[in-house]
């Protein structure tokens, strides 16, 4: 499984998302091939299984909605864990 964390500009918030996604996936015992971060202008959906993104950026991202984890609060590990469980059907 390849996960891409995307932010609107720069790379700070997407790096934070990447660290949180790795932490939550490890906690849940979910194996993954890669979790990486990028900004929206550099995003490529090739080879990406899931995207983690803030609600502010999600509408502009060209990616299937059913494989997009959209967060209202990108700092909330609880919200991230809940939405990962829903999306991955854990």
Image (cartoon, rainbow, N blue to C red):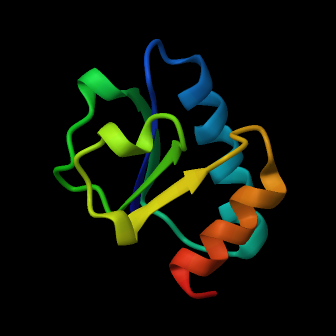
Give the residue displayed 78% in from the left and 66% down from the top: 27
Q: Where the N terminus falls, by quadrant? A: bottom left
Q: Residue 75's image quarter?
A: top right
Q: In this view, does 48 lie to the left or right of 70?
A: left
Q: Is the residue 18 above or below the residue 51 in the image?
A: above
Q: In this view, does 10 lie to the left or right of 77?
A: left
Give the residue displayed 73% in from the left and 74% down from the top: 28
Q: Is residue 70 left or right of residue 9?
A: right
Instruction: Residue 29 in the image: state x and y as whole percent.
Output: 69, 75
Give the residue displayed 27% in from the left and 63% down from the top: 64
Q: Where the C terminus falls, by quadrant? A: bottom right
Give the residue displayed 61% in from the left and 25% down from the top: 13
Instruction: Residue 56 in the image: state x and y as whole percent.
Output: 51, 35
Q: Can residue 52 be seen in this view?
A: yes
Q: Is the residue 81 above or below the residue 3 in the image?
A: below
Instruction: Residue 15 in the image: state x and y as whole percent.
Output: 58, 28
Find the residue positioned furthest to the left.
Answer: 46
Q: Can residue 1 be seen in this view?
A: no
Find the residue positioned furthest to the top.
Answer: 10
Q: Who is closer to the viewer here, 64 or 85? A: 64
Q: Who is closer to the viewer here, 33 or 76? A: 76
- How many numbered marks does the figure carry? 0
Instruction: Residue 72 in the image: state x and y as whole percent.
Output: 67, 47
Q: Is residue 67 left or right of residue 78?
A: left
């Amino acid at each position: 499984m390849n996960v891409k964390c995307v932010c609107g500009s720069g790379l700070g918030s997407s790096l934070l998302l990447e660290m949180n996604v790795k932490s939550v996936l490890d906690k849940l015992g979910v194996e993954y091939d890669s979790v990486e971060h990028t900004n929206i202008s550099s995003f490529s959906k090739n080879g990406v299984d899931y995207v983690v993104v803030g609600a502010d950026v999600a509408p502009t991202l060209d990616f299937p909605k059913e494989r997009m984890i959209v967060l209202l609060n990108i700092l909330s590990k609880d919200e991230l864990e809940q939405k990962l469980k829903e999306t991955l059907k854990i």
